[in-house]
Amino acid sequence: MKKIVIAGAAVMALATAPSFAADAIYAPAQPSYTPEQADLAIDLAFGVTATTAYVSRGYDYSNGPAIQGYVEGSYEWVYIGVWASSLSGPLSAPDTVEIDFYGGIRPTFGDLSLDIGYARYYYNRTGDAGGEIYGKASYAFTDVGLTPGVELYWDPENRTNYGVASLAYALPYDLELSGGVGTTFRGNVDWNAGISYTYAETVTLDLRYYGSNRNDPDMFRNKFVASISLDSSISALRNMMR
């Protein structure tokens, strides 16, 4: 994310991102909970990933393997979390760590899932690099195993935008094919496609191809990335102990 945010400070007239939400959001009244019910509504998720490259929006920020992790607390639709990754190479210098703080809401309406929030990006040496308002939507066609999605990001300080269209297809034996195409709306286009396997909803192996049109000389042309992730939550651990 570092180059996208910092480069945006020098580009003062990018295309405006489409409006993601209505002018006013009307949420239904929240039900009252007993102490036990409220405890079940609160969750803490966490995970760690080892990857052969930290790739984002057509840029490689690790110049080799990277370790990433996150912790996220949630209550009903509301969530707040922190995500971090190791950095290396000329594109990231002089920083060696990225830390992102984020929060928002994730309402669901049947098979429609929404995610509206804000993320702030920090680096261990250069400090604050700005933040983005984001909106995400996906719809699960469960009968055929297809889940299309769209994501929009807007940085009001650096006046940059980014959009993604994605598609996932569930396969037997906990396998999934997925891919996406992203754009800065200013000529840079990147894409990815890959296959993943998830064991017990906890361990995920992912092999993915990333490419770009290399409109920016710092973007890579193509790259294969392998990752292994371990994800869990307090609620999942509770269910395992029952």
Image (cartoon, grey):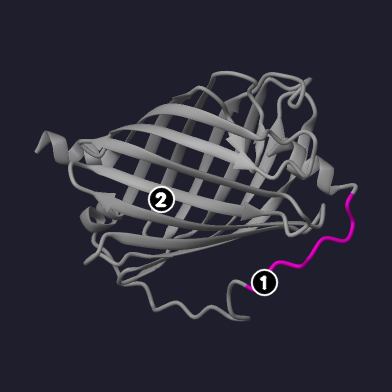
Residue occupying image coordinates x 41% and y 50%: 74
| Residue type of the residue flagged with mark 1 | Pro
Residue drawn at (57%, 47%) of the image: 191
Disc ID at residue 35: none
Residue at x 25% of width, y 39% of height: 201
Cβ atoms at labels 1 and 2 below 8 Å apart:
no
* Residue 64 locus on image (x, y percent): 59, 18
Looking at the image, residue 226 sits to the left or right of residue 18; the answer is left
Q: Is residue 94 left or right of residue 109?
A: right
Residue at horizontal 66%, vertical 28%? 61
Magenta: main secondary structure: loop
Which of the pair 223/22 is nearer the observer?
223
Quadrant assignment, res 121 = top right
Residue 175, position in %: x, y?
26, 42
Q: Nearer the viewer, residue 94 or 196?
A: 196
Region of the chain picked out in magenta, as a range = 11-19
Residue 87 percent location from the top left of the image:
65, 23
- Which residue, given by chain and number where applicable, does mark 2 sit on? 74
Whether residue 174 is visible, yes or no, is yes
